[in-house]
Image (cartoon, rainbow, N blue to C red):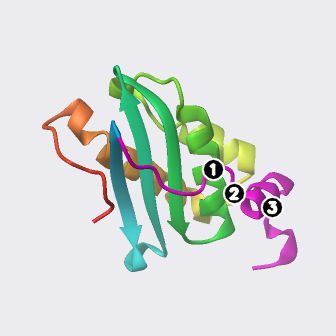
Amino acid sequence: MAQDAYSPRVRELFRHTPGAGSLDGEGVRCGRAGGAEHGAEVVLWVRVLEGAIQEARFQVLGCPHTVAAAALLVEGLAGQPAAAARVDTTAISERLLLPVEKLGRVLLLEDALLDALAGVRGPDRDASSPE
């Protein structure tokens, strides 16, 4: 991919990766989406206490666009009610100036968030590990 294919915001978030890492302990849930067949894999951890997301972290195997989108997502999750938390795919895409062919990467984030919050929105499960 050409050097100019990444917006300045993508470059910044890829370089510094705020929110990268994992969580453990009380209230932690984990969701996963993607894989080799999608060209990217996302693991998302959220700490849910008293019905609200307190913090979130991510691990991504994928392109700089995917890493940057995950960083924006976790930045905006803290404080959201867990039962209503969502990925604003349009806002993330616009903030990062994502090319059309990378929009699917943002949808992987949405899938990972839904997976992580499945116990809040449906039957409970232990999701403290990505497997």
- Looking at the picture, does residue 28 appear above or below residue 7? above
Q: Position of residue 96 (x, y in %)?
A: 73, 50
Q: Residues within 10 Å of mark 2 (few under 14, many from 20)?
A: some
Residue labelled with disc 2: 17
Alpha carbons under labels 1 and 3: distance apart: 12 Å
Residue labelled with disc 3: 11
Q: Position of residue 123 (x, y in %)?
A: 13, 37
Which mark is nearer the camera, 3 or 2?
Answer: 2
Which residues, given as a range, are shown in magenta?
Answer: 1-25
- Looking at the picture, does residue 41 appear above or below residue 16? below
Alpha carbons under labels 2 and 1: distance apart: 6 Å
Mark 2 or mark 1, earlier in chain:
2
**Where does the N terminus fall, quadrant-wise?**
bottom right
Mark 1 or mark 3, earlier in chain:
3
Name the secondary structure under disc 3: helix
Looking at the rendered structure, the kind of residue marked 2 is Thr
Check residue 71 in the rendering and tell me which mark sits there, or answer none.
Answer: 1
Q: Is residue 111 magenta?
A: no
- Looking at the picture, does residue 54 appear above or below residue 57? above
Q: Is residue 22 magenta?
A: yes
Would you say 32 lies left or right of 91 here? left
Q: Position of residue 52 (x, y in %)?
A: 41, 23
Would you say 84 lies left or right of 125 here? right
Looking at the rendered structure, the kind of residue marked 1 is Ala
Q: Residue at x 34, y 21 (%)?
A: 51
